[in-house]
Amino acid sequence: MPHDPHSRFRAPVVVDRRLIAKYDKAGPRYTSYPTAPHFSERFDAAAYRAEIARSNREESGRPLSLYFHLPFCDTLCYYCGCNVVVTQKREKVIPYLAQIKHEIAAVAAMIAPGRKVTQLHWGGGTPTYLAPDQIRDLMAFVHAHFDFADDVEAGVELDPRECDRERLVALRESGFNRASMGIQDFDSEIQVLVNRVQPVDMTRRVFDTCRELGFHSVNVDLIYGLPLQTVARFTPTVDEVIDMAPDRIATFNYAHVPWLKKHQVLIPEDLLPTPAQKLDIFEMVSNRFADAGYVFIGMDHFAKPDDEIARAQREGTLYRNFQGYTTHAGCDLYAFGITAIGQLRRSYTQNVKKLSDYYAALDNGELPVERGILLTDEDLLRREVITRLMCDFALDPAMFETRYGIDFDTHFAHALAEFDGFAADGLVTKDGRKFTVTPAGRLLIRNMAMPFDAYLGTKPNQRFSRTV
């Protein structure tokens, strides 16, 4: 029988508790490399302007991806790890929209004409906190300042509690064709504990309306590891989601990090599932999704096998950035709004975190940059190694030798020594020089990326979530 190079993507993930216990440690999620703790305030607005100019000179053929951070929420979800502004005073969004337009206009004026936007995303917060007329107005402004490709992928995060039909119509008419909605857990008692009460029928109504209005892709987010969750209690939520048949499903491992997110102290720690219980939950989730025909993309993402993200993984073109897994690898990502993180080929840039600082910078005619980092050639190499490993579940040293002119075995001798240990434990197989991650290794992919991280452990008091 001929070898099927794509079989590793169809095989269900294997939860090997012995190996997970052995490799249990904290580590980055690698939505960037170098990771955000290594960004520096020495990278300022002037550095960002210089990088935009460099991109125009050297990368004029690269398409654009645009991210807009809309931070407002009506209520606080206690598990939330995002940068949000919780207020019921809807008028607070008005000055923010005025200022984000100033930022859009300033950045757009610096980008060389003719570069096409192929991807756009609204995140938060709660983008649907905006009223329908505000949605239309902001998107019209964006369209007036950028040149959009005909097949642009325009995605928005939805909170079903803040998403009536009028808002969905406004989003669809403004060009959005992808929607992702937070569900987390349909269990009513758990919803009360995490302060996110969202009945099943409400979510179903929003989901069905998205389908009716012609959104090309409708995705959902779940969280496992919330208080009171068990396999038995979470199974009905998983089955309900399978019945809804979203195109993609993100099943996030709840990271309880009250030292970073103070409000998480509102979640009773004594009700959180143990690490062993969380593994049981994830195993149930992954098995049920596999039985329903979904493929495991990586980390916490599942998709239908005909979805673009699954096809990109099979074709070796999947990419990873601050929005997670994406099919748009060759884009310059420009990000707008507080805390938003942009990514040009050789730099990352993050905006200020406070509304007052954001407004002050823009009022003074300055870009609201707080920090960032310029990437060295070594950073670019290591980022590519980590990205391909996390997206392809394989590592081909010859590819990097051809592309970067290095001797991979010498350059990464320390990392490859660790891979010998991974191979001995059955996490990877080796064919010649090429490594392939096994179904038992896929849950530990962050551990396999860490040996290639030259910055890991160089910054004191770094704290990350557990790798599994």
Image (cartoon, rainbow, N blue to C red):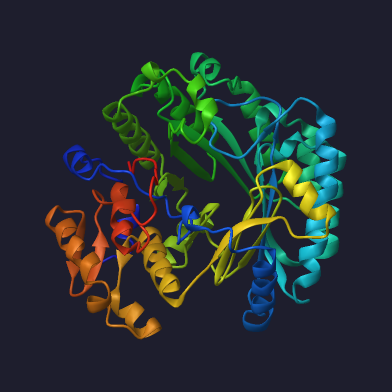
> Horizontal and vertical percent for residue 7?
30, 59
Image quadrant containing the N terminus:
bottom left
Q: Closest to the observer: 385 or 10?
A: 385
Q: Is residue 149 left or right of residue 444?
A: right
> Horizontal and vertical percent for residue 454?
35, 64
Q: How many marks?
A: 0
381, above or below 170, in the image: below
Q: Closest to the observer: 362 or 83?
A: 362
Image quadrant containing the C terminus:
top left
Q: Is residue 188 left or right of residue 454?
A: right
> Horizontal and vertical percent for residue 411?
27, 76
The answer to whether residue 11 is seen in the rendering is: no
176, above or below 249, in the image: below
Q: In percent of the image, x 58 and y 20: which residue is there? A: 195
Q: Quadrant of residue 4?
A: bottom left
387, above or below 413, in the image: above
Q: Is residue 274 left or right of residue 254?
A: left
> Horizontal and vertical percent for residue 327?
53, 61
Q: In percent of the image, x 18 and y 75: which residue is there? A: 432
